[in-house]
C-alpha cells in the first residue's frame, strides 16, 4: 500500500487566457507599483507608509525594546520604522520619505493587510 501526502490529481497550470478554462491569472504588483502604493499622499498633505505584505505589525525589534518611532519623531528616507512578521520572517519596513510621524493607526502586534496604512507622515 502506498501512502501519499499529496492528492493524486494535479491542478493544471494557470493560463494567461484564464477565462476560457475558468482559471484566473494572478498578477502581483511590481516593485515600482509597490513603492507607489506604499508612498501615497493623503489629501495633498500627509504621506502614507503602507504595508507591503500581510503579516503581524511590530513597533519595536523586541518586546522589551523601545519602539522604532513614536508620534512626533522625525524620519529619514531608509530609516526602519517597524517590522512586519510574515511566516516567521521579520521584515524591516523603511520610510520612503523625510518628515514627521503624525499618526500610527495600527496597534502593536496587530495583524495587517497588504496596502494597509501603517504610518501617516507630514513631509518636510
Image: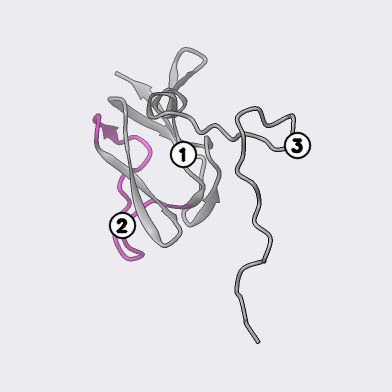
Where is the C terminus found, in terms of image quarters? top left
| Circle 1/circle 2 CB separation < 8 Å | no
Q: Nearer the viewer, mark 3 or mark 1?
A: 3
Q: Nearer the viewer, residue 93 or 47?
A: 93
Q: Nearer the viewer, mark 3 or mark 2?
A: 3
Q: Which residue bears the numbered disc 1? A: 51
Q: Which residue bears the numbered disc 3? A: 22
Above or below, 52 relative to 111: above
Q: Residue at x 41, y 62 (%)?
A: 88
Q: Nearer the viewer, residue 49 or 46?
A: 49
Q: Earlier in the sequence, mark 3 or mark 2?
A: 3
Q: Nearer the viewer, residue 30 or 93?
A: 30
Per the model, the C-alpha gap separating discs 3 and 1 is 31 Å
Where is the N terminus found, in terms of image quarters? bottom right
Q: Residue at x 45, y 38 (%)?
A: 52
**Label of residue 61 in the image:** 2
Per the model, the C-alpha gap separating discs 3 and 2 is 44 Å
Q: Magenta-highlighted stretch: main secondary structure?
A: loop
Q: Residues within 10 Å of mark 3 (few under 14, many from 20)?
A: few
Q: Residue at x 70, y 38 (%)?
A: 23
Give the image location of residue 2, x and y in percent.
63, 82
Q: Residues within 10 Å of mark 1 (few under 14, many from 20)?
A: many
Amino acid at each position: 500500500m502506498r501512502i501519499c501526502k499529496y492528492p493524486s490529481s494535479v491542478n493544471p497550470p494557470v493560463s494567461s487566457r484564464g477565462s476560457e478554462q475558468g482559471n484566473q491569472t494572478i498578477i502581483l504588483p511590481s516593485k515600482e507599483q509597490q513603492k507607489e502604493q506604499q508612498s501615497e499622499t493623503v489629501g495633498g498633505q500627509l504621506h502614507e507608509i503602507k504595508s507591503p505584505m500581510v503579516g503581524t505589525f511590530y513597533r519595536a525589534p523586541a518586546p522589551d525594546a523601545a519602539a522604532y518611532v513614536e508620534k512626533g519623531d522625525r524620519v529619514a528616507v531608509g530609516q526602519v520604522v517597524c517590522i512586519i512578521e510574515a511566516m516567521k520572517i521579520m521584515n524591516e519596513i523603511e520610510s520612503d520619505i523625510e518628515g514627521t510621524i503624525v499618526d500610527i493607526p495600527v496597534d502593536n502586534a496587530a495583524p495587517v493587510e497588504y496596502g494597509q496604512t501603517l504610518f501617516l507622515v507630514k513631509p518636510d
